[in-house]
Amino acid sequence: MPIQSLRHRPKPGRVRLPSAPRCMPLRRLLVIGGAMLMTAVAANEMYKVLTAGTLTLLAALVLILFVVLFAWIALAFTSAASGFVCLLTGGGRHLGVSPDGPLPALAVRTALLMPTYNESTARVMAGLQAIHDSLAITGQLACFDLFILSDTTDPDIWIAEEAAFLALRVRTSGHDRIFYRRRRFNTERKAGNIGDWVRRFGGAYPQMLILDADSVMSGEAIVRLAAAMAAHPDVGLIQTLPIIVNGTSLFARMQQFAGRVYGPLIAHGIAWWHGAEGNYWGHNAMIRTAAFASQAGLPILRGRKPFGGHILSHDFVEAALMRRGGWAIHMIPTVIGSYEESPPSLADLAVRDRRWCQGNLQHAAVLSGRGLHWVSRLHLLMGIGSYLTAPLWLMFLIASILISVQARFVRPDYFPAGRSLFPDWPVIDPIRAMWVFGGTMGVLLAPKLLSYLALLARPEERRGCGGGVRAFLSLLAETLIAGLLAPVAMLTQSAHVAAILLGRDAGWQPQRRADGAVPVGQVVRLYWRHTLLGLLLGGTAWLVSPYLALWMLPVVLGLTLAIPLAAFTAATGPGRAFRRLGLLRIPEEARPPATLAEAKTLYNELTPLDGLEESGLARLARDSVLAEQHRRMLPPPRRKGQDPIDVPLLTALARIEEADTAVAAWAAMSRDERVAALGDAQALGRLLVMGATLKANGSFPSD
């Protein structure tokens, strides 16, 4: 898996891709050209709104920001419109995959990879067992092996993972199909985790399916993806459309409703015009191992963090590099049976978005990479834009207020250039402004309306969303609440961009996936600045003009109510209330698929067995079988003169030497030292011998 260069063009891959759909230039002309035409018309109208003659500097800034932001939503509209047509005409058969035809027989081996980092072991193992059992029902389980690839840095979760892995093997009789590997050093994070597996084991598997810790996929979906990959030798990656499920908080239920109703239209649209130059979303995707190994070795970006170093948002870059190497990248939205979960609150979404923001801004260094397909560059540019639009929107709002302040309080200069027969009247056309505002909002909201119309045309899904009336009420509720949350997210993302530009690294934090409840004090600390800005904007707008205050009301209201909105949407009570009313429902909630239902049942059964109430060392001291299996899974000892010195291990050995008991040694260690001690046979053996006298009375502490 060689490291790829962005500065040198590689040898050209295959020129013709047999799997590429026909008429791709025409499709892209309709989508991109249509968006450019809409933007040109809107820019002309906005120009007429701002002035009847020459532009002032402030008006020019507003115009530029408006054009950039309108182009963004115009492209989303034209792409969604193409998806709407696709859905109404049957959705198409991408790569010949039928969602409900007979299952094809497989003749190749596929590895299912589950990277995990300090995650709930119950969630990971429940999802894997549900996938395993679903594959068994297809009759083609023998073609699949499952790998748990741990980058966990918490010693207690590490031992819990090993215990849960061994129990999973027993429950499924999967001793020859389910494997566990933990890295001592989690270099390059998830991308490095996958890369390590590819280098060590990838040669045995022509294909691999990348999962996430919250992923669940049906056996039928996996078999169809594996068969599609095997049938098209030019395809390097097939991305599915994951459906968000299991939301309990109001925020998570909004996310899953939006993903379920709007997602198919968006996915069909991008599949229609992306063609063989699709994108990769990091999970629930089938990948050809040879394509990934030969093309997706990520370079280390020059410079310091946060822009330099290892690439955080690796998926977009991996797809671009594989396409550069001559492999097709496809989206297949017709495959049903791919599921994931959503962050339960706005605060949790912000934690994930902070990392993604840094990763996407890093893509600026990849944009100029030699040999990339222009559509791949567009993917990277859109990833950057998804975060830069937030500060651009904020700048647009501030500039618009300043124009109003200027018109209200600054005396105009009617004869700025000396002698003139006619004065230079400063003009802003309020009627045209109203039409531009209404048209912009129409373009912004049209994809939601098109998604609803497409839902009405699919009777089974419409009933699963509660029927046409409840689905429409859900759409209104989601649009209203999301509209209020949008300026809150705008300010948060703007702060993220500013922090990254100032050189602050995001780090790597595990994602919270269950209850979204946040203490009131923490909500206040997170969002008091949003409230203050909302009050300032509202007060300024009212002093300038009541009409400006009315125009600014959605933004001002959202920011001012940021604290109660964040707390309300993170709670499960409102989520349950909406569910009782039949709102924000999705078909997978009304009639859960067998794989999802099994995963949920297993999660509830396994959660009490996580074993995190006691320390990892105490668990090994109590369970001799687990301790022996743990020893067998340890990596080889350090090679003198070849491997780097493990400072935490040396410190841990010194603490063991100085302590009288294992309890004292364990209590004196930091988390890194505990991990190092559990990962070294010598240190672990000494701790277990020291703690043998405590095993009988169970007095080993949790910490």
Image (cartoon, rainbow, N blue to C red):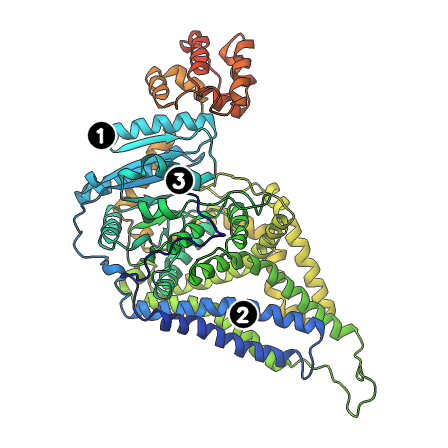
Instruction: Verify CB contact (< 8 Å) between mark 1 and mark 3.
Output: no
Whether residue 581 is visible, yes or no, is: no
Which labelled disc corresponds to residue 173?
1
Classed neighbour count for the residue bearing mark 1: other residues with Cα under 10 Å, few (<14), some (14–19), many (≥20): few
Question: In the image shown, does 312 or 79 lie closer to the viewer?
Answer: 312
Left or right: 419 with respect to 76?
right
**Residue drawn 45% across the image and 34% down it:** 118
Q: Position of residue 658 (x, y in %)?
A: 56, 9
Q: Give the structural element (helix, strand or loop) at label 1.
A: loop
Q: CA distance from mark 3 to mark 2?
A: 39 Å
Q: CA distance from mark 1 to mark 3?
A: 28 Å
Whether residue 108 is visible, yes or no, is: yes
Quarter holding residue 176: top left
Quarter holding the N terminus is top left
Q: Which residue is mark 3?
A: 195
Classed neighbour count for the residue bearing mark 2: other residues with Cα under 10 Å, few (<14), some (14–19), many (≥20): many
